[in-house]
Image (cartoon, grey):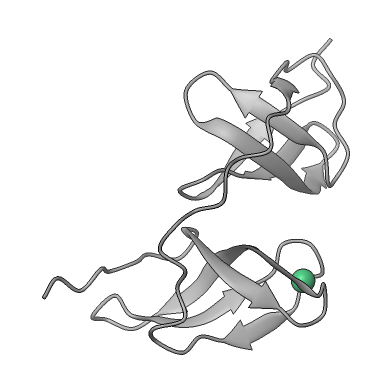
Amino acid sequence: MDVQTYQSGERVEKFCAVCGEERGHVVASVTKAGRITRVSCPKCGTRSPFKAGVVTAVRPAAKSGEAYDRTRTYRAGQSLTHPVFGAGEVTALVEPQKIDVLFPDRMRRLIHARA
Ligand SMILES: [Zn+2]
């Protein structure tokens, strides 16, 4: 049996009790063996322990957002579609011109508002 291993920053699907919905979470910590121990919800920021076996294997169909455009200014919660990474959801503005976007495989930092 293959055991999938993870690294922090990767995405897993989990039910968030605070948001009240099944949604993409970001792996916050893993064991040396690559087992997830904690995940965080990028929407509400809640960190929760991760029990093995809770991963929903099937990723939800991506909400298709408009094509990513680095000259646009994004807000948390917006959807976008990146030509390489696919459908993503803006989870946070980290700097005036940088955003964190949760893609189907992991969190990535993109630039925005570069007119
Ligand atoms: Zn949440």
- In the rendered view, does 69 fall on the left or right side of 13? right
The outermost residue toward the left is 1
Q: Is residue 89 depicted above or below 58 in this figure?
A: above
Between 51 and 60, the residue placed more toward the observer is: 60
- In the rendered view, does 19 fall on the left or right side of 37? right
Q: Which quarter holds ligand 1?
A: bottom right
In the rendered image, which quarter contains the N terminus? bottom left
Between 115 and 42, the residue placed more toward the observer is: 42
Q: Is residue 35 depicted above or below 61 in this figure?
A: below
In the rendered image, which quarter contains the C terminus? top right
The x, y position of residue 59, in whole percent, is 49, 53
For the point 56% across and 51% down, which residue is it? 60
The x, y position of residue 3, in whole percent, is 20, 74
For the point 55% across and 65% down, which residue is it? 13
Between 88 and 31, the residue placed more toward the observer is: 88
The x, y position of residue 62, in whole percent, is 61, 40
For the point 81% across and 45% down, which residue is it? 93
The x, y position of residue 98, in whole percent, is 74, 36
